[in-house]
Image (cartoon, rainbow, N blue to C red):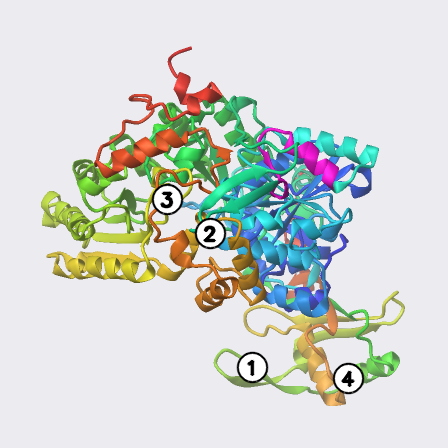
Amino acid sequence: MRKLALSDEVLLSIDKPARYIGGEVNSVVKDPSKVDIRFAMCFPDVYEISMSHLGLQILYDMFNRREDVYCERVFSPWVDLDKLMREKHIPLFALESQDPVKDFDFLGITLQYEMCYTNILQVLDLSGIPLHACDRTEEDPIVIGGGPCAYNPEPLAEFFDFFYIGEGETQYDRIFDLYKEHKRQGGSRLEFLEKVAELPGMYVPMFYQVDYKEDGTIAAFTPTNRHASPVITKELVMDMDSATYIQKPVVPFIKVTQDRVVLEIMRGCIRGCRFCQAGNVYRPLREHSLEYLKDYAVQMLKSTGHEEISLSSLSSSDYSQLEGLVNFLIDEFKDKGVNISLPSLRIDAFSLDVMRKVQDVKKSSLTFAPEAGSQRLRDVINKGLTEESILKGAADAFHGGWNRVKLYFMLGLPTETVEDMEGIALLSEKVAETYYDEIPKSERQGKVQVVASSSFFVPKPFTPFQWARMCTKEEFLEKAYIVKNKFKEMRNYKSLKYNWHEADLTVLEGVLARGDRRVSAVVETAYKNGALYDSWSEFFKNEIWMEAFDACGLSIDFYTTRERSLEEIFPWDFIDSGVSKAFLKREWENANREQVTPNCRQRCSACGAMKFKGGVCFENKN
Amino acid sequence: MKIRIKFAKHGTMKFIGHLDVMRYFQKAMRRADVNIRYSEGFSPHQIMSFAAPLGVGLTSNGEYMDIEVHSTGSSAEMVRRLNEVMVEGFEVLSYRRLPDGAGNAMSLVDCADYTVRFRNGYEPEDLEGFFAGLEAFYGRESIPIVKKTKKGERQLDLKPLIYQLQVLREDERPAVAMRVSTGSTDNIKPELVLETYCREIGMEITPLTFEVQREEIYAPDFVPLEALGEDIE
């Protein structure tokens, strides 16, 4: 029997012990004594969330293809085990070998959302690794951060040895080679970090100094080590088909959020929605070829035995060979009991036809993401979805047998007026009316159900809205009430439903998203006072965070509601994400003028990403 | 064509609950390319049913499921193919065809064999005294108990529901072998027998005191479930 880090006593007294035993189908078994590098790959959330993340599976597969590397997984223990591990002094372990994380060479942590930051400290703490990079010794693993939140790593700067900015496929081989060489030569931790700092995309926070002005904004951001570069350019894969993809995804025993094969069809987005960080930092759009995707779909379904495959991208309808791919999947797998799931599709004749083939119309609902309630505000955010196309899509869908519609909106967007807010209710009402207008009474399958949800807008780095003022909690809630009250006036009120998100959490997310280095202290204080699993509403304790801001002498408003000048140096300005600050400024001005910018395939807007020499920027140009 | 599959569940797999074992085998059928039958409808599922759920923490040498297939290779080939896609801890032991009209495993379950040992560190000081007392306890005419059910409490005589009880003193780690009534009507867990005895002798136990392993599941007349099928050449 494989050894386990936890005893039967512990495992049989906690919820879902299968989270902690490893041994899943396709998990990698190696002899740790026969590798040069041990890498602990961490997603700082519970197993079911962590195992649903595609990027982690890609890197796990890629790292383990190297004979000299053993990459294992480590996730946040759930609160029940967290308590036991602290009581019994059990160190955090990796799932495959069950060995303590502290014995590894690297601990790589993916940063997918801001509200997992206290869980990062939990992972370090339970592993017995000093929280601050500057306190670590030669015995401690090198702690690396990556993923979307690494585009503003500053609120976590104290806790990481270095951040990998951009897509993981490109530089890890060099990092590993460097590390092996470094170990052979017996160099120090500092020397290794200096070598890493010279690689493209690598940011070593301790090699930089930040000076602040009296008003609290940044005066200067300066390298203090000669190996560190003043600007860090993001890493990205340019030839998508040459990058390794997963052949054998790990198959969890317990049901996880993504209990299916996930096929990434492309990276990046042509749309240029002005609130969207992913749409900006993953530019330019790069597609996989159809043949490549067919091949991987077959391989992954075979190696996992999953009964469902899902396409993944920011906007699947923009994949140039979508029709060919979807038809292939239906022809190949529909009769083998494999479900095909197609998220992020624009609703049109093609997608409705496909959806009819792959899902039970009676049980499924249609999703539109207008994001804003009025055409004016949709122009501000550059969401190229018109009311006409929504109602047309809804009408087609109703004729196709659907009668449930979900609509996603944001509240608190720049320039928003009461009219824009009320537009959410009005648009929802029009969708409901479309149903009653289009479908004769005799053919209706019950009432139409329109569910509108709104989240609160958080300005993110590397978007045209990075200059935007964010609302306070009170303002957010007031906006939600305005919408809610408008819904009550609607004729088809009984067919409509309106939900809105938590406001406390959003405010905090806003601070962490655009925070600077000083915010590290708040995260640490909140963690030490009991904050954990903040993205889980049942565990989120706002008062702990409020006390932490007080204790650290930092103002929430400075990070959220403050108006930022176009000249301000942002904490993340040292990163070059491809889209230039000049482009983002132009887009911020276009937003304020309610002017729409065409998508990348219609016209190039010179965002800057063309310098990567590939993807959509060179489509049809050979 | 109906197939009965027997498998073992050992080691760390004892932490995988029954529903997840079902999910595991559904995916294993696809990996091994078993030509299994699906139900009709928009979300078809495999025709698969299990004989008797095994609790978390228990190991087993005799778990059963029935499936229906359109076509199949020989028993030897299918056992090999399934074992090629198993993880450590699961092993397929047999794959046999059931005669037409055979009842499914779940409806046939009558009793099951278990081996129960003290978990390391939980043994009483006087192990022989414990076993001798247990044998005497089993030797009684009747063992009345109150069993808690979903609807409340029920008076029950345990004795006729224990078909066999034997102490295996020669084993490397001494054990109690038990054959108890299993299934939907009188489902007796081996732990219940030992709990009843321990309560009588005033010995405190916890859910962790014993390690339980299922050895075999039987249809009426003590016919092992796999004996109802035959090997496919």
Q: Which amino acid does label 4 sit on?
A: Gly
The verdict on a common chain for dots 1 and 3 is yes
State the residue position of label 2: A512
Helix, strand or loop under label 2: helix
Marks 2 and 1 sit apart, C-alpha to C-alpha, by 52 Å
Query: In front here: A427 or A592?
Result: A592
Q: Where is residue A76, by image quadrant? A: bottom right
State the residue position of label 3: B42
Query: Which one is closest to the eye, mark 1 or mark 4?
Result: 1
The verdict on a common chain for dots 2 and 1 is no
Q: What residue type is labelled 1?
A: Lys
Q: How many labels does the image show?
A: 4
Q: Do the residues labelled 4 and 2 touch (CB within 8 Å)?
A: no
Q: Where is residue A269, by image quadrant? A: top left
Q: Which of marks 1 and 4 is nearer the N terminus?
A: 4
Residue at 33%, 58% (x, y): give it: A472
Q: What stretch is highlighted in magenta?
A: A190-207
